[in-house]
Image (tube, rainbow, N blue to C red):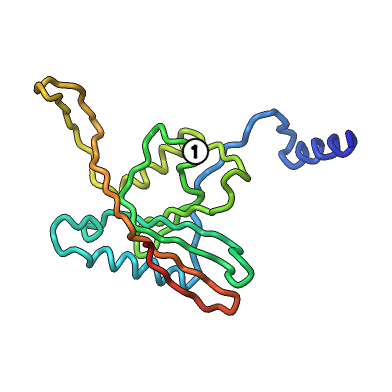
Amino acid sequence: MKYLTLFVAIFICVQTKGNCQSKRLDTKISYLGLKDPILTENIKNLISREVNADTSKNNLFRKGLGYIYLEIKQHVNSDTVRQYYISPQLLSIKEDAADELYPDFYSYINNRLVVIRLQGLDGFTYRNLNSKTKRDFRKLVDRYLEKTQKRTFYDMNNKKVFTDKNYRLEHFKFHAGIYIYIFNNGSAILEDEK
């Protein structure tokens, strides 16, 4: 057994070109091209639905804001090959957010950001995102959100409590997502989130 452990350690050293320090490797949030036509078509439909849902001036998707959250689950059961969950989002990622709150990948459809999570990797892999990767991704998401502004908050006695230099109103839609089930025979079923 100790020879097997030694072999694995040597193999890792060779593969990492001699960098055998006991540190975690930094990972990145990479671009991923989406080519499943059923998925891409339904993301386009969801974007269109959100843009046309509200004709008021408060429709942020119509203003070009908002992004799509995509969760991919592979091999759900014997009949279902893949399951997608897509949802419109208008939420920012906070600076102190844990690595687990960042997506695995990102993409674009119709010039709209799509953040991608691969379900099933949680608890199986460990990601170590460096601060630059996190900052760059937050900037990417911020392009699809309302601009931050300076806002001062007061208590009930009208005394200043604190000032937030990067205040942004967060928007969240309940039950706005869609589940897409892809079957072995290539057919698909869509189900609105309830």
Q: Which residue appears at 13% of the width and 57% of the height?
A: 57
Q: In which quarter of the image is the C terminus?
A: bottom left
Q: In which quarter of the image is the N terminus?
A: top right
Residue situated furthest front in the rendering? 194
Q: Which residue appears at 32% of the width and 45% of the height?
A: 142
Residue 6 image point, x, y percent: 85, 34
Tell me the element at label 1.
helix
**What is the tally of numbered marks visible in this picture?**
1
Using the image, determine if residue 192 lies above or below residue 139: below
Q: Which residue appears at 71% of the width and 39% of the height?
A: 16
**Residue tagged 1:** 99
Using the image, determine if residue 47 lies above or below residue 12: below
Q: Nearer the viewer, residue 175 or 166?
A: 175
Lateral position of residue 63 relative to residue 180, left or right:
left
Name which residue type carries label 1: Asp
Residue 63 image point, x, y percent: 21, 57
Residue 108 image point, x, y percent: 40, 59
Lateral position of residue 31 relative to residue 63, left or right:
right
Residue 27 image point, x, y percent: 56, 41
Lateral position of residue 167 relative to residue 114, left or right:
left
Q: Which residue appears at 21% of the width and 23% of the height?
A: 162
Q: How crowded is mark 1: few (under 14 residues within 10 Å), some or many (20 or more)?
A: some
